[in-house]
Image: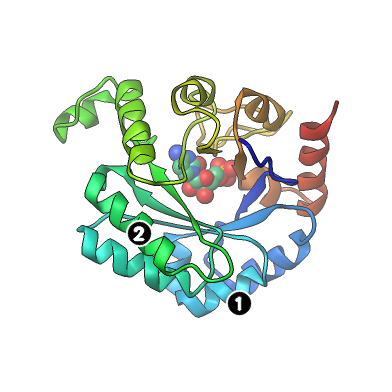
Amino acid sequence: MSDKPANPILCAIDLADPAKAKTLVRELKGAVGGIKLGLEFFTANGPRAVRDVAQGLPLFLDLKLHDIPNTVSGAVKAAAALEPTFLTVHCGGGRAMMQAAAEAAKQAARKTRMKLLGVTVLTSLDERDLDSVGQKGPTGEQVKRLALLAKESGLDGIICSPHEVAELRQLVGTDFLLVVPGIRVGSLGHGDQKRVMGPRDAVQAGADYLVIGRPITGSPSPPAAARAMLAEIRKP
Ligand code: C5P
């Protein structure tokens, strides 16, 4: 938390169509701190489309890499060509994989080094799912175990739910990024997000960045929605 970003809002551009995505990102310039493009967009449209859509905005490339250390290292180096600000890897890939990713990010750094964020436990998994793949629960404990392992292995932060932020902040200290999806505002429906929080509360609980999709992209004016959230976050 040492370097608080001027605008912590990263907008999830969950659109498969590159033309529509590009128009939306153009509208959002100046209203958000960055944009997130995920595996679906990357797989469908490739790295060139990612660069084209990002239009120079800080890019969160959400590829959730998970493979043997050598392969992840190569993928991190390849991703560096897109100069992302953030790139995700699965903490479940283990210490050596995360260390290899961190080393690759360092070696591939251009003007700045990308920040690597770990995915701990997917929120789609419950305790029974963890048990069925042989992972030790309860889920909250597994999240904490993987968060500490990510920090020890040289990652820059993790993705976590808004309701985990305060406890994780205590655990990992201030020099580790907590990036938080599951943000909802006012009268907006919760969609498929069950464990949600408002943007201001999430930042006050210790979030460094917020990943916000539909509350911005589904609004009649996406830039106005993003600016309203930023104003709420910054309110004295
Ligand atoms: O539209 P919404 O605000 O729910 O979008 C949140 C973004 O964060 C989506 O891109 C979603 O895939 C991602 N995400 C999430 N929950 C997680 C991890 C990632 O919603 N646990």
Is 80 in front, or is 49?
Answer: 80
Residue type at tag 2: Glu
Q: Secondary structure at mark 2?
A: helix
Quadrant of image for the C terminus: top right
In the picture of the structure, the residue carrying the numbered disc 2 is 103
Is 87 in front, or is 11?
Answer: 87
Location of residue 52 with respect to 9 vertically, above or below: below
Residue type at tag 1: Asp
Q: Nearer the viewer, mark 1 or mark 2?
A: 2
Residue shown at 22% from the left, 25% from the top: 128
Which x, y percent locates residue 235? Answer: 84, 29
First-in-chain label (1 vs 2): 1
User: Is residue 94 in sight in this rendering?
Assistant: no
Residue shown at 29% from the left, 27% from the top: 142
Which x, y percent locates residue 21? Answer: 63, 67
User: Is residue 37 in sight in this rendering?
Assistant: yes
In the picture of the structure, the residue carrying the numbered disc 1 is 52
